[in-house]
Amino acid sequence: DYCSGALFATRRELFKKLGGFGAEYRPGYYEDTDYCFKVRAAGCKVYFQPESAVVHREGGTAGTDTAKGMKRFQVINQKKFLTRHAEALKLQPPHPGWSNDVALKSLAWRNPKRVLVAAYNPPEFDRDSGSKRILDLIELLITDGWSVTFLAQKWTPSPRYTRLLQQMGVAVFDGRHTPTEELLALLKFEIALLAFWPVAETYLPALRKVSPQTRVIVDSVDLHFLRVARGVFKEAADKKSVGALTGSYGSNTMRELNFRSRDCLILLPTWSAVRIRHCRWPNGAGLFSWVHSAICRTSAR
């Protein structure tokens, strides 16, 4: 919504064009909020930089008592602000009625095109190709105008990969400590892109319970049951023995294939995927090419 006047930066020409801080807010309070609302009304955007840090002593200049001294203008100017921006304030999202990290972040997301991307961890794009695929899909969604929220199921500490997503404008949540059902109910995602079947198995029940309108796409990235089976038989062939698949393998295979509550399944266009596409998948399956960006993301290093 706005950046506090404790520290923000704006272009001089834009500041002059919009009339700077409103004189009606002198000697202070709400002039920063008013300016940011004018910036938005002019078709520009207000950005928050999550890595910025500033020490601001609350009430260090005017104290904290709003009934006396300069501090009383906080109440006086609030009324001026409410009057001036009454129409814009009508478009603000409703107050959630409760306050936590999820609720506070949700108030910043006005874009109706909201997509949830869930995976094991923030994509480690320079360590494995599956992560690179996820990051490229996120970039495609952002380019197409979607607001992306990322939910990490396991959350292995990886500050530089988390930082890259945040600098792209992606809200990142630790799935271990995030009230998932509250997040889904509050943001009402239009699409949920779940990478890897164990991740889908974790979040599909909550999605169908509190956000049934969300279209769920499961990106298998690979056909894991085929990869495991080939590994077992190759190892057996190398040892000149007979390979055998275990009951655990059969159970995992059924779990991987049995996503009856999803809306779409994405498979890689390998020969095996092409063949399995013709099986009787509920709601159908589609092939999505392995598209990799040629951009070297040095900012994450």
Image (cartoon, rainbow, N blue to C red):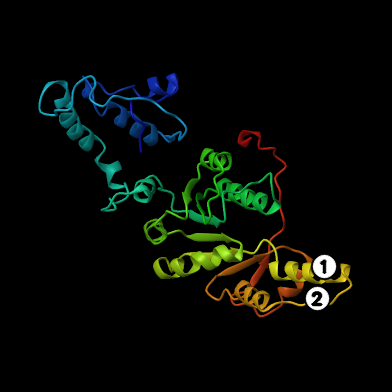
Residue 240's x, y, as percent?
89, 72
Residue 104 relative to residue 52: left or right:
left
Who is closer to the viewer here, 189 or 205? 205
Residue at 29% x, 49% y: name it: 99
Q: Mark 2 — residue?
A: 243
Where is the C terminus found, in terms of image quarters? Answer: top right
Q: Which amino acid, by three-letter code, is at mark 1? A: Glu
Residue at 30% x, 31% y: name it: 33
Label 1 element class: helix
Q: Mark 1 — residue?
A: 235
Where is the N terminus found, in terms of image quarters? Answer: top left
Who is closer to the viewer here, 242 or 168? 242
Q: Which amino acid, by three-letter code, is at mark 2? A: Gly
Q: Is the residue 118 above or below the residue 79 in the image? A: below
Res. 59 visible in picture: yes
Task: Return the disc, 2 or 1, that comes first in the chain's sequence.
Answer: 1
Question: Which mark, by number, is residue 183?
Answer: none
CA separation, marks 2 and 1? 8 Å
Question: For the view shown, which residue lies furthest in the left direction?
Answer: 67
